[in-house]
Amino acid sequence: MTRPAHTFKPIAHGFTLVELMVAMTIGLIILGAVAQIFATSRGTYALEEGLARLQENGRFAMNFVTEDIRMAGYTGCARLSTGQIGNMVDPPADPTTFNPDGIRGHASTGAGTNLGDWNPALPATYFSNGEVEAGTDVIIIQHASSLGTHLTGNLVPSNANIQILNTAQITSQIAAGDVLMVADCKAADIFKATSVSGGGKVTIAHSNSGNTSPFLDHAYGNEAELMKLVSRVYFIGTGVSTGTSASTAPALFRKDLVAGVLQAQELVDGVEDMRVFYGEDTAVTADSAVNIFRPANTVTDWSKVVSVRIGLLLRTPHESGGDFDTNTYDVAGATVDPTDDRRQRRVFTTIIQLRN
């Protein structure tokens, strides 16, 4: 008889408390290192993303402002004076009254956000109290914008409409209510289009509904050009600019003349400050060379302004980094000390020569 074999089970040994504590310590060290790397990488990514957006916003804002400033005062083939420009719009006042100099500015006194806190005071035809960020400058620009078309019919001043060639490009750009300018090298008239009808030719009426008179001040030939009147104002807006909370982050705003009414539009967020200085040609014999840059409140003759130096202070959308920004910034010649926070900031400055 064979004796049955005995089956021996291995004895299971567990981890000691010391081994568990060592393993947990090593795990926590590794986890902490991974968390630190993740936090650093995330912070670096947020910083780089914020700086990239800041750089993009700065270029975008400058492109907008530069294009308009360069065209300030444009009226077609010749620069016209006030006496050469008729205004039919009712009432014939800002922002439809054309300023031949094409540009004017308002320097902040830094005292508040009421219209009188700028020098010269902000015009009530453009703003109401509280719309503009305190301590920032405002610039108003006017010029004609070419539609690439000339008159083809009804050229006498006593006629209450004008005619132009009918093209898809033209009919998509002109609508009833638009403020237009017809100009040649001798004179110009500003009027509000009361109706626009198609056909072989586009007929644009300018009746006395919206105009002080249905008739133009001057007679024009086929060489006369039809253009849109551009009245634009650039400023750093508050939440009041769009009817939202006043705590809204500062941004670069533009008010544009649309169908005879100024409409506000936020262009670029994160723009904290705008400062503008005006280059004057003060020489006895004008040569379009800048002799001095002045703030708006010391410019006495806007016809002598031949260039504009503009500076924008931008910040990143979110805070990043561990250090507070306690720097002061030179914004086109003005010293700006923003509120201490952890945002990154950059100054963008350019000088723009006026063409007209």
Image (spheres, helix red, strand yellow):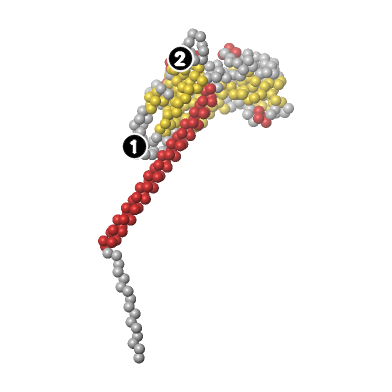
| Residue under pointer 1 | 323
What's the residue at 49%, 8% (across, down)? 284
User: Image point 46% across, 37% down: which residue?
Assistant: 52
**Residue placed at 32% from the left, 53% from the top?**
29
Residue 352 on image: x %, y %: 50, 22
Query: For residue 89, what is the image quadrant?
Result: top right
The disc, 1 or 2, on the residue closer to the chain's N-terminal end is 2
CA gap, disc 1 and disc 2:
41 Å
Residue nearest the observer in this picture, 113 or 267: 267
The three-letter code of the residue at mark 2 reads: Asn
Q: Which element carries disc 2, helix, strand or loop?
A: loop
Q: What residue does disc 2 label?
A: 291
Against 140, is 32 above or below? below
Q: Check disc 1 and give the amino acid type.
A: Asp
From the image, state whether disc 1 or disc 2 is nearer to you. Answer: 2
On-image quarter of the N terminus: bottom left
Visible residue check, residue 91: no
